Image: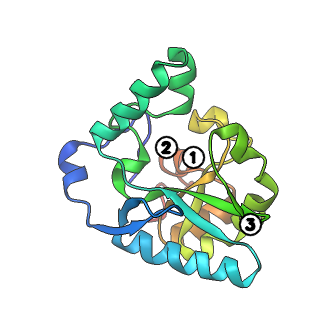
Amino acid sequence: MLVNKNSPVSAEEIAKVNLAHTVDVYGNPVRLEVETLKAFRLLKTAMLENGIMIGLSSGFRSLERQQELIDGLLAQFSEEYVASALAPVGASEHHTGLALDFVVRRDGKWIDGNADVLYTADDIYRQVHPHLAEFGFILRYPLGKEHITEYKYEPWHIRYVGQTLAAHLYETNQTMEEHYIHPAPNGAPLL
């Protein structure tokens, strides 16, 4: 399912998500859709075998939690900034349990915090990106596609879509918006 500012998810759809419980890199509770969590664990293991340590930092968000995050940022920043940094309530992929933010480890520390801090590890994130499709993930907000996704490049935000669609999107360098809004010439998007 495509979830963005123009295609919000309903409270009824959110209630149907089969969530599994886990913890983030600091031991805080996080929930992810069951298959998404399984796939992330496999990705994490594969990356460790390649000498890259990744960990979960964010998963499922309720509508209420999204509003709390928005309110927190609005207390510090302009509405324009907040709109560019966070999806409106109902329009966040985190509501599906299929999207997650991950962090990387460098010099014995998790590179975590605000976007400016996370971007300092872009070189490590870029080593992970080519492996995402093998485990059914896509980089949801890629560099150079900001005008399509309406979000800045986020090397840490990935979305589980299954291996078939992930491979197709990676090979064709498409975002979900390009795939679903502008499908292939034969008329139907690959499911």
Q: In this view, does 80 lie above or below 126?
A: above
User: Along the horizontal axis of the image, is 68 left or right of 191?
Assistant: left
Amino acid type of the residue tagged 2 in the rendering: Ile
Q: Nearer the viewer, mark 2 or mark 3?
A: 3
Q: Which amino acid does label 1 sit on?
A: Glu
Q: In the rendered structure, find residue 81 and report the number of the disc placed on it.
A: none
Measure how far apart labels 2 and 3 are at the Cα level.
42 Å
Is the C terminus in the top left, top right, bottom left or bottom right quadrant? bottom left
From the top left corner, tell me how far across and down residue 166 is, in percent: 56, 66
Q: Name the residue under label 3.
A: 108
Q: Can residue 186 be seen in this view?
A: no
Report, in whole angstroms, how far the alpha carbon at label 1 lies from the one at label 3.
38 Å
Task: Indicate which disc residue 181 carries.
Answer: 2
Within 10 Å of the Cα at label 3, are there few (<14), some (14-19), or many (20+) other Cα atoms? few
Q: Is mark 3 on a helix, strand or loop?
A: loop
Residue at point 71%, 85% (across, down): 49
**In terms of depth relative to the viewer, which is nearer, 7 or 157?**
157
Instruction: State which tag comes first along the sequence, 2 or 3.
Output: 3
Q: Which residue matches tag 1?
A: 178
For the residues bearing labels 2 and 1, Cβ distance under 8 angstroms: yes
Residue 157 appears in the picture as rendered: yes
Task: Name the residue located 50 percent from the left edge and 16 percent from the top edge.
Answer: 79
Q: Position of residue 146 (x, y in %)?
A: 66, 36
Q: Quadrant of residue 103?
A: bottom right
Q: Along the horizontal axis of the image, is 183 left or right of 119?
A: left
Image quarter of residue 18: bottom left
The total number of labels drawn is: 3
Give how far apart the Cα atoms at labels 2 and 1 are. 5 Å
Left-right relation of 80 to 68: right
Disc 2 packing (10 Å; few <14; some 14–19; many ≥20): few
Amino acid type, callout 3 = Gly
